[in-house]
Amino acid sequence: MQFSGRLVALVATGALAALVGAVVFSGPDDASDVAADQLDPSSIDTLPGAVITAPPTTPSTIPPPDLPNRGPHPPLRDIDGWLQSDVSSLEELRGQVVAVQFWTFGCRNCKATLPHLQELYASYHEQGFEIVGVHSPEFSYEAEVPNIVEAAADLGVTWPIALDPTKHTFHDWQEGRRGFWPRIYLLDRDGNVRYDHHGEGRYAEIDAAVQELLAEPSA
């Protein structure tokens, strides 16, 4: 009877260890494949009874981020036309603060940033702020202009769109071996790159950066 009791205890201990091991090693096999290096919290399974701590609320106003002058922006290369604008170059927007966002309408991460861009446009456009969406398609159907026009209307994209079907501008602006959808650059009134962020998030920081650049005079 004593041996049986020990056997039962060992079996129970082994079962508990196996359960703990399953909890520790469950989850996504490779998070590096998520677009724009952003994890979607809704895609991560949670265990019954697990406590999820919400991230702290972003304050409505924060100090502006560091905005070093990275020099003049690269050119827009092999752009195949513009939508929703009479301009045909970034040089025509000198004197305005410009957000240049690389995006494509089929990208989930890109679409997630659009409500914030709409807020920025509504808040600061009359103060000299412009957005240029450089549309660099990932798939062939995203390169069709009628599809871009339809998607822009559906998604509420009302600012100028530069068409970059060959992605030459996409790769010229993004140094290194990887390019990101979405990626946003802020240009000051003189066309210098002052801010760079890829992926979603940092919305309050971007807002503060736009305010700071609008407050700066042209050189």
Image: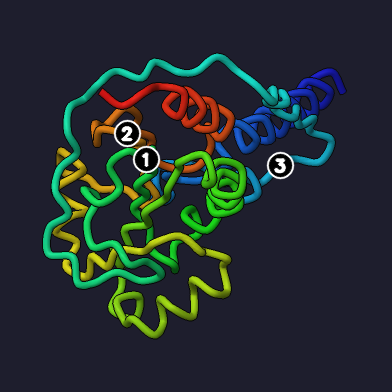
Residue sitting at 16 percent across and 39 percent down? 175
Q: Which colour scheme is used?
A: rainbow
Whichever of labels 2 and 3 marks the residue nearer the N terminus, that label is 3
- Badge 2 crowding class, 10 Å Cα cut-off, few under 14, some 14 to 19, many 20 or more, is many
- The amino acid pointed to by label 1 is Gln
Measured as percent of width and height from the top left, residue 166 is found at 16, 67
- Badge 3 crowding class, 10 Å Cα cut-off, few under 14, some 14 to 19, many 20 or more, is some
In front: mark 1 or mark 3? 1
Residues marked 1 and 3 touching at CB (< 8 Å)? no
Report how far apart the C-alphas of labels 2 and 3 lie in the structure.
Answer: 47 Å
- The amino acid pointed to by label 3 is Thr
Q: Mark number for residue 46?
A: 3
Q: In this view, does 163 lie to the left or right of 97?
A: left
Quadrant showing the C terminus: top left
Measured as percent of width and height from the top left, residue 148 is found at 40, 76
Report how far apart the C-alphas of labels 1 and 3 lie in the structure.
Answer: 46 Å
Residue wearing tag 1 = 96
Whichever of labels 1 and 3 marks the residue nearer the N terminus, that label is 3
Residue sitting at 27 percent across and 68 percent down? 163
Residue wearing tag 2 = 189
Whichever of labels 1 and 2 marks the residue nearer the N terminus, that label is 1
- Element at label 2: loop
- Badge 1 crowding class, 10 Å Cα cut-off, few under 14, some 14 to 19, many 20 or more, is many
- Element at label 1: loop
Residue sitting at 53 percent across and 25 percent down? 208
Vertical comparison of 23 with 119: above or below: above
- Element at label 3: loop
